Every structure is written in C-alpha cells, then in structure tokens.
Amino acid sequence: MKYRRLGKTNLQVSEIGFGAWGIGGALWGATKDTQSIAALEKAIDLGLNFIDTAYFYGKGHSERIIGGVVRASNKQYGSQLLVATKIPPKNRVWPAQADSSIGDVFPKAYILDYVQRSLDNLGLPHIDLMQFHVWQDSWAAQDEWQETISEITRQGLVKHWGISINDYQPSNAIKALETGLIGVVQVIFNIFEQTPRDLLFPTCQKLDVGVIARVPLDEGGLTGTIQPDTIFAADDWRSHYFRDNRKELLAERLEALAKSLEQLETPFTNLAEAALRYCLSDTRVTTVIPGMRSAARAEQNCAFSDGTLFSQADLKSLEPHAWARNWYE
Ligand SMILES: NC(=O)c1ccc[n+]([C@@H]2O[C@H](COP(=O)([O-])OP(=O)(O)OC[C@H]3O[C@@H](n4cnc5c(N)ncnc54)[C@H](OP(=O)(O)O)[C@@H]3O)[C@@H](O)[C@H]2O)c1
C-alpha cells in the first residue's frame, strides 16, 4: 500500500481508502456485520489506514462497526487508523438546494449535536476528519458555521474539516476552500465523471486541500459486474440508479471504453483496477474510496495501490469516455 499526504492536514493516508456506505446495513440490500468487519480487518491488514463513513450510513450503524474495529486495532497493534465521517443535512435534503439557507441545513446546535453523536457511535476521543455531507457555496462567507467548527476544533473533538461536495457539482465548494477552514474535499471522480479536473483539482492544488475521490466505480457500473440482465434486490437502492434502459446504455459505454483500455500503455488486469488506477493517476487525488463489503473486495482493491500510474497519454485517451448524466436523480 502506498500513502499520500492529505493536503494541509498533513495526514498520511493510504491511496486506497475504505468506502463504508455499503456496510451501513441500509439501502444496499442484505448486509452481514460479520462480513463487513472481515472486510475492514482485511483492508487494515493490507495497510489501509483511512476509512470514510457517515452518520447517515445506517443511522450510525456504519460508524459503530468501524469504531469497534478501529478501537480493537489501535489497542492491539498500536495502529493509528484515520476515520472520516459526515454530518447529515438537518433538512435531510440531498443535494443541498441552491436556495437553501445554512440555518435550515447546518445550524450551530445541530452541528454540535451531530459531532457528539458520531463520537458516541465511533467510541473514539476525536474525529480525524468531519465533513459536511452536502454543501452550497453561497453559505461560505457566513460566520456561524466558521465559528462553530473553529470552536469544536479548539475543543479537540474534530481534528480537520472537509466538504463532501454535491453530486456532479465539483465547483460548488471553492469559496469554502478559500476561507482556509476546509482542508479536504470529497468529490465524485471516475472515468465517466472527469469534470473535477477542470477547476476543483487545480484549486485544491493551489490551496493545499486534500482530495478524496468517491464513487470511483460508478456504483458498480465501472466494474463489469453489472450487465443488461442484472437484477438488483428490491432493497438495493441501485435498482433505482440503474433503472429503465440505463443498464443497456452502460453496456454501450463499456464496450467503447474496452476498446480504449485495450490500447493503454500501462498494463492492468480488469475494469475495476483500471477504474481505480484512473483516479490515482491524477496525483492531485489523495485517496480513492471504493465501497468494499467483503474481505475479497478489500484484498482486490488494496492490491491496486502499487505505484503503477496511467501515463499522461493513457489519461488523454480516456477523456472521450466522460459521460455527463446524473443517475442519482
Ligand atoms: N454524498 C457522499 O458523501 C457520498 C455518496 C456516495 C458515496 N460516498 C462514499 O464513497 C464510497 C464509495 O462509493 P460507493 O460505495 O457508493 O460506490 P463505488 O465504490 O463506486 O462502487 C461500489 C460497488 O463496486 C463494487 N466493487 C468494489 N470493488 C470491486 C472490485 N474490485 N471488483 C468488482 N466490483 C467491485 C462493490 O461490490 P460489492 O457489490 O461486491 O460490494 C459495490 O457494488 C462510499 O462507500 C462512501 O464512503 C459518499
């Protein structure tokens, strides 16, 4: 496992981080906690030290599983695992709406309450990185959130702050980054969604902000495991994401992508590997956080951090595979 510096936080984080939405026990069909714990333990054994979760992933369930594993690992091996979590929007609206007020989404008392809830769920003395789970940049200049997070940091409850940027709105946090209070962004970045390279990544580089690439596998679309005849369980939210003729559209895109991948200078073994390497090959990305629900997935994904990066020519050849759409809607 290779490590990169998470911007101005100065934390050294593994190139492959643990995306912990799927282990929250809600929305992703049936999950077994024993399997989730095995996935986390395997990833940690393989050098992964960065875990991304959220209060909202099973209303604390994902945080509680992670807290148990992290506390045990820190105690047994003296490891220093890093946990990032998120404060959900008070009005429960994803993404944050352009006309919403921060008073309705992240008022002071609510931020304080959710920091404490996450601390309780994790059972840890502090949170390494707390992220706002949605954001509207029109809120950036307002005093209350700035003073609130500064106060929480002074108390030692949260070490660093981040923003998990609204889906497909990579520039909708730039003003917040300019306040200097936000050290990390989390953004959708993958072979289909390349727009963070235009403005967000150069800004992060200039302001020394760490970048977490989320949904690197397009919710499974960039793995080859989702075919036109794939049927999702009724309680798997991806029956919505891949609804109607979307699996057929995906198959057409993957066929075109396969032709470009065959021509790459850099060797790779399968589509998931190519998708994760794509993210890490932009060195402005600090860590990529695929969802991993089994030890087998953890083993596969951690192996991809071996220093091999796609060349600039390879990256250029993948540019035409950018695909503007929003299947979360
Ligand atoms: N708004 C936000 O802040 C937000 C939103 C979305 C995600 N996130 C974060 O980003 C993380 C990653 O996103 P995600 O989990 O939604 O989607 P993702 O990582 O793009 O895709 C997850 C899917 O890929 C599959 N997969 C993983 N590794 C694979 C491999 N090597 N080969 C084949 N398939 C593989 C998983 O398989 P299995 O089905 O076998 O598990 C799962 O179905 C989340 O867990 C969460 O931490 C944040």
Image (tube, grey):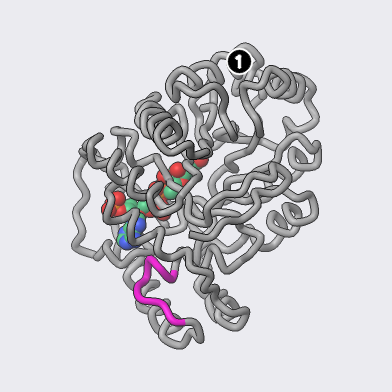
Say how many tags the image has.
1
In the shown orientation, is residue 304 left or right of residue 173? Answer: left
Q: Is residue 7 above or below residue 109?
A: below
Element under disc 1: helix
- Looking at the picture, how far across and down is residue 284, in whole percent? 66, 60
Residue 215 colored in magenta in the image: no
In the shown orientation, is residue 126 left or right of residue 26? Answer: right
Q: Is residue 144 above or below residue 31?
A: above
Q: Is residue 265 above or below residue 209?
A: below
Q: Nearer the viewer, residue 185 or 158?
A: 158
Residue 271 colored in magenta in the image: yes
- In the picture as drawn, the residue positioned furthest to the front comes out as 77
Determine the residue positioned at 52% across, 38% down: 80
On-image quarter of the C terminus: top left
Say if residue 57 shows up in the picture: no
Amino acid found under the numbered disc labelled 1: Leu
- Looking at the picture, how far across and down is residue 10, in whole percent? 69, 45
Determine the residue positioned at 43% across, 45% down: 19
- Looking at the picture, how far across and down is residue 105, in whole percent? 60, 23
Q: Nearer the viewer, residue 315 or 268?
A: 268
Q: Nearer the viewer, residue 270 or 101?
A: 270
Determine the residue positioned at 57% across, 42% down: 166
Q: Looking at mark 1, is its residue's CB closer than 8 Å to ligand 1? A: no
**What range is drawn magenta here?**
267-274
- Looking at the picture, how far across and down is residue 190, in whole percent? 50, 61
Determine the residue positioned at 70% across, 49% down: 7
Location of mark 1 (residue): 112
Say if residue 134 shows up in the picture: yes
Q: Residues within 10 Å of mark 1 (few under 14, many from 20)?
A: some
In the shown orientation, is residue 29 left or right of residue 77? Answer: left
